[in-house]
Image (cartoon, rainbow, N blue to C red):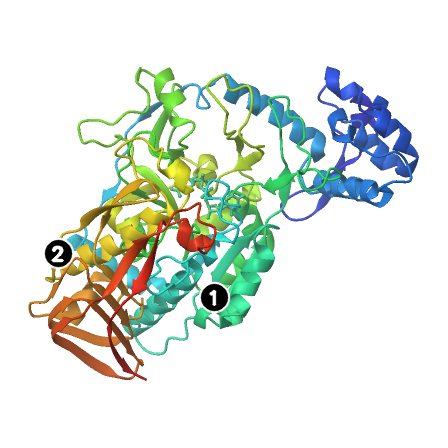
Amino acid sequence: MVVVSEFICVTERNHNGVTQQHSNRSSPPSPTMASAVTEPNLQRNLHLLSAEQVELAEMGQAHLFEHWAKPGVDDDEKKAFFDQVSRLNSSYPGGLASYIKTARELLADSKAGKNPFDGFTPSVPTGETLTFGDDSFMIFEETGVKEVRKAAFVLVAGGLGERLGYNGIKVALPRETTTGTGFLQHYIETILALQDASCKLAEGECQTKSPLVIMTSDDTHSRTVELLESNSYFGMEPNQVKLLKQEKVACLDDNDARLAVDPRNKYRIQTKPHGHGDVHSLLYSSGLLNEWRDAGLRWVLFFQDTNGLLFNAIPASLGVSATRQYHVNSLAVPRKAKEAIGGITRLTHADGRSMVINVEYNQLDPLLRATGFPDGDVNCETGYSPFPGNINQLILELGPYIEELTKTGGAIQEFVNPKYKDASKTSFKSSTRLECMMQDYPKTLPPSARVGFTVMEPWLAYAPVKNNPEDAAKVPKGNPYHSATSGEMLVYRANSLILRKAGVQVADPVQRVFNGQEIEVWPCVTWKPKWAVTFKEVKNKVSGSSSISQRSTLVIKGRNIFVKDLCLDGALVIDVADDKEVKVEGSIQNKGWILENVDYKDTSVPEELRIRGFRINKIEQLVKSEP
Ligand code: UGB
């Protein structure tokens, strides 16, 4: 390795994209490292490589060459292998050597269950807790909508979705199958509706075009572009949407940080995205933040790819940020112990330092056990963990954000989150990689920074789609499934509870089982964001005494649709052009739409349906449409 560090002039690209040369002499060669060049298959092929590639080969990853063919066979692939290694080397600060070194240290800590927050004592922080529909919620929502025209939206969508096992890109998945609206389509339509609602509240002219940035990766980029272009950006102007692609990093096969061979090509190293934390350095080096500042924007809202309820929380939480002048505002929901979401925690160091930060779900238990909570991550008398659950929706104030990134370049501390096969932690379910998390941004902030969080009811704001059906059926009893099944059913529940709060008699749900998951089935109620993005708008469009039976489906597509004294027992679709106004009333009964069970193993059923465990059979409906 000394040889390596001696010769390799590691090119480090700092966050301003400026290349710097330096040599890292740090780590002595590990036993496995010395042997690579002596690896027979590599020895035979050394003549194929440039001097720089030979040096890179000396990083002691002999297993990478075990299956290499003799010279003359696959030589182009062998060269392509080293081209990939060069890319990985130059796209990571300090090069692959520093990547492997850091990986070994973090993997050892993780295996040992080392407390990543040594010296810090956790306590439950105080934040803003909102109750849907009460006066203060309504005031925060109103304030938030006013602020939307000064906001930019950032969707991190570079993740593979390994736990979900869906072959498409997650943002293309239907948020619900009653209308088939995909996550990205719903997000864009909601941003446009918020933009319009905010403009309506503006005095005078309002030309706002809320910017949307989507962070992609090699795994999601081209299909995200395809999804946007083939759907005319779902109504957004193309220049309103910017895609920033994050780099990928090498995967690690074991606790020795042996680089993983790509299962699809033995002449490639397997790579995965580096974690959603890359969004900060990408935004910094893109120059967009300065553009937004110069355009008078004040907020940057970060969100993720498959939480179908996330926008229910946005207006009120933006109102909290503006009212409390938060530099950082994290959205949270009450969290069940062991739920795969981080816990918002106040960490106080023995030296007096203190910060309010997300402690990730794989780090919370070891931290608590090491700091006087012998049972670790458990629920308290509320039936929930005392630490609010981080749902990774962040609202940052632009000015202080730019100031901080000017100091850090957007660099975020790395961690490793291996999915171990078993409690011995000696082997991984699948290869891992170094990652960084966007919610770690506050770690470097000065104590003067105003860092807060807003807690919402889980039924309103959180319906993630993360787990494949098998893993979902295995979550601890009482914990949410985080599956495509629960993701859709929770949308219907939230909409039903919102209508109830607005005075509609919505029937109670029934229990059903889909893909082994016992779940509440509420009436399948959906509405387009342009119908309502705030509770005030819902209340303005629902009046009199209406009722909806459990087996009903209600689809509201259009802006000026007013529901009054409606008694629905069946399926009703209202599809009206924006300039039309329609009143929906009276008794409507028909055979409706029913949910038929399908099995996730039944490959004759489209993937996006079988991962839900049901499909909708549209037997009979009433359609009210005015083009
Ligand atoms: N993502 C990227 O864009 N690039 C990457 O390299 C990786 C991911 P996961 P995770 O939803 O409640 C987070 O895998 O990271 C995108 C929080 O850390 O779905 O395990 C990806 O496309 C956790 O505290 O989630 O957990 C997706 O949009 C909790 O908030 C997003 O990043 C949890 O999310 C999240 O990636 C949650």
Q: Residue at x 78, y 40 (%)?
A: 81
The quadrant in which the N terminus is found is top right
- Residue at the image point whose x is 46% and y is 64% from the top: 211
Residue under pointer 1: 295
Whether 515 is drawn above or below 261: the answer is below
CB at disc 1 and ligand 1 closer than 8 Å: no
Q: Quadrant of residue 188?
A: bottom left
Q: On the picture, is 457 further left or further right than 261?
A: left
Left/right of residue 564 with respect to residue 405 in the rendered view: left
Report if residue 313 is visible in the image: no
Left or right: 91 in relation to 192 = right
**Which residue in the structure is indicated by mark 2?**
507
Q: Position of residue 354 (x, y in %)?
A: 37, 28
Question: Considering the numbered disc 2 on the image, is that residue within a helix, a strand or a loop?
Answer: loop
Residue 432 in percent (x, y) is at 57, 32
Asked if one can make out residue 111 in the rendered structure from this viewpoint, the answer is yes
Mark 2 is on which residue type? Ala
Name the secondary structure under disc 1.
loop
| Of callouts 1 and 2, the N-terminal one | 1
Q: Looking at this view, is 498 or 3 the one in front?
A: 498
Q: Quadrant of ligand 1?
A: top left
| Residue lying at 54% horizontally and 69% vertically, measured from the top left | 229
Q: Amino acid at mark 1?
A: Ala
Q: Nearer the viewer, residue 451 or 134?
A: 134
Residue 333 quadrant: top left
- Between disc 1 and disc 2, the foreground one is 2
Name the image quarter holding residue 583: bottom left
